[in-house]
Amino acid sequence: MPQQLLRTLAERHADDPVGTLVAIIDWLRPGPAEDAASAIDRIEGLQAALEADPDAQQALHERLGEWLDQARFFQILAGLGLFSRRGFLRELGQRVYERLNPAPADPMNARDVFYLAFHETDDPDWVAQVPPACWERLMRTLWPWEPDETGQRGRDRLTREALYAVEMLAIWIAAEEFEPDILRLDPSMATRDSSFIALQREVGAYVRDYVGWLEGKLKDFHDDAHIRVLLEQCREEVERLRRRAVSGGTSIALTHLLERLGQTIARIERLLDILDPKACEQCSERATTLFTELVEASAERHGIRPLIRRSVRQLARSVTENASDKGEHYIAGDRPAYFRMLASGLAGGLVIAVMALIKIHILESGFARLPETVLVSLNYGLGFVLIHILHGTVATKQPAMTAASIAEQVELGERGRANPRKLADLLLRVGRTQFVAIAGNVIAALSLAFLIAWWWQQQAGTALISPERADYILEGINPVTGLALLYAAIAGVWLFLSGLIAGFFDNRAAYLGLEARLREHPLLRRLLPQGTRHRLAAYIDGHYGALISNFAFGIMLGSTGYVGYLLGLPLDIRHVAFSSADLGYAMSQEFAGPLMFALLLGFVLLIGAVNLTVSFALALNVALRARGTRISRPLNLLRAYWHLVRQRPASLVYPPAADVDTSTEAAHDGNAATTTSRDEPGNHGDR
């Protein structure tokens, strides 16, 4: 009951304005079985109770008005909800320390009071559901806003605090212009009068004139129209820097900086909305909107998981944005690209057949587990690098390029809703590209493996592999009697990680200016002539991510079994291309008949389906989270996909003639999709 709350406030918090605020919010907060409607009812009940008890209302006004006259609002207006200027690691360390040894709350700091009042994790949810008009009525009930001396003094003080926050935020924006990462992207900002500097100058004049207008020294009010124009120019400048960061390389620090700039611009706009005296009717509603945003930010102020989640999202975006420009496989959009993908898959399958044979003989050589693991890992890693150098590909590779393209189509839709038909067509192309890559791998790897084993038996008179190894291979690809699908899922995770590794190192190469560094490297200048040095620098820069991630991917695949051995867990990997080569070698030992062969081939393709599904699902999830978007209507997407398949059933596995899709072209900067590229790892293996 409101009367009980008023008695509690009078008895326990008569001299404690902060305790009064905390007690009121605790009383308003909905219980476990309640929703925001109960908070609304309590706000209305409190308002009615105070109107019926003028003495209690006057005491409350004096108590909270005195706090309002002394409290500091700068940190809550100019800091809460904005990215920290300390960077991720220092901020993480500070939050961990605050959780272990929290500093005492400062009752005169509005930011600390917010944290004391809204300390429950679900506070942002119910606060946001309470209508702004209801919060406005509560504020007017608790604080003296009447047009008298006390009310005017409180309004003027908050106005000056907001003006100071706007001025400091503008100064911070201007200072960010000279950050080394910003100057790297646009060196001209050091010599020209940018919109960041112009904004700070205009805000300074606006604040000075606003204070003069408040004090009656100026008759005419200095409106914020020019500031609004400059804010829009600053926002465009930030977006331009983001685009440059995609091609010029980014880092978690740079992405963090650009995000902070965007947040600071938005906060200045929010404060200007509140300060505008020409829109007094909307000021209260705008202030309430800012209030709900600050409640949400306060709930995450000392949270470790929100900080990690937010920073990981920035890291994911820095990788996927760069990967959207690079990748070993683009989407095959027409028949020439389709057949190039088939040829690339066949080339990869031929190398994999040899890699599978080397792996089998390493496993049969009787090495101890550790040297065996090292040799198998090197076989995978160096083989994948060779496949990349020969412009081959390995099936089920779902690069960050593909996931980023789909996420881009989703983001282009209004409010995160993509055009279902365009997205469905893009998914159709992705599936078709993966089908032809799998077909090329399986055909080449299985056929060459069988021919090698047959030729060896004809020449040497003995089987290439032992019967025990053949039985082990056939048992290993059987998902009914073994864990083949689990191992295929593990390989899918490594495929996903290899895409992230490629995106990270490609981005790193751009960020460091690797090509220019290698061209002028002192040692290379002494060893190589200029033309050779420049070609080498261009190749390494263009393939930096692919080369590193391919080798790292081989290490991951080759060491999975050894990690399982150390942990006592049944860990291994299965991949469709290596499984098809293993099947070819096993069938050369003793052909089990066409029906059994068809069944075993079906098991191999099932392994490929798991590889593809896991790797693609993880990559798409990261790309969507990195862009802060989602597929909001999956049923519409499924209907659009089914409609396209029903119109052109053969398009599932073969592109129609003159198959051109404008949405896919737009997703690839207006260029027809090709099947190969120079920058993503696309190689995988099986143990």
Image (spheres, rainbow, N blue to C red):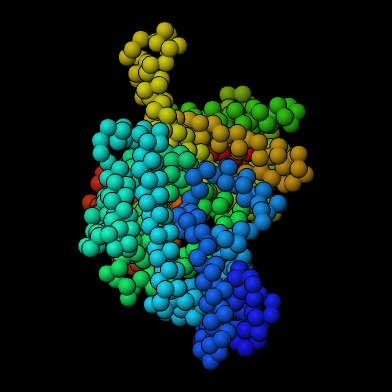
Q: Residue at x 53, y 62 (%)?
A: 71
State the residue in front, 486 or 326: 326
Q: Residue furthest bottom?
A: 52
State the residue in front, 412 or 93: 93
Q: Residue at x 22, y 62 (%)?
A: 220
Which quarter of the figure has residue 641?
bottom left
State the residue in front, 535 or 647: 535
State the residue in front, 117 or 35: 117
The reply, left or right, for residue 394 in relation to residue 284 is right
Task: Please state the horizontal and vertical placement of residue 427, each as a whole percent of the image.
Answer: 38, 56
Q: Residue furthest right?
A: 568
Which quarter of the figure has residue 109?
bottom right
The reply, left or right, for residue 602 in relation to residue 572 is left
Task: Please state the horizontal and vertical placement of residue 292, each as a whole percent of the image.
Answer: 48, 68
Task: Please state the horizontal and vertical placement of residue 497, each as a whole percent of the image.
Answer: 54, 43
Task: Please state the horizontal and vertical placement of residue 418, each as a whole percent of the image.
Answer: 35, 62
The image quadrant where one finds the C terminus is top right
Instruction: Work out whether 40 lies above or below 181.
Output: below
Which quarter of the figure has residue 552?
top right
Q: Residue at x 27, y 41 (%)?
A: 194
Instruction: Work out whether 360 lies above or below 651.
Output: above
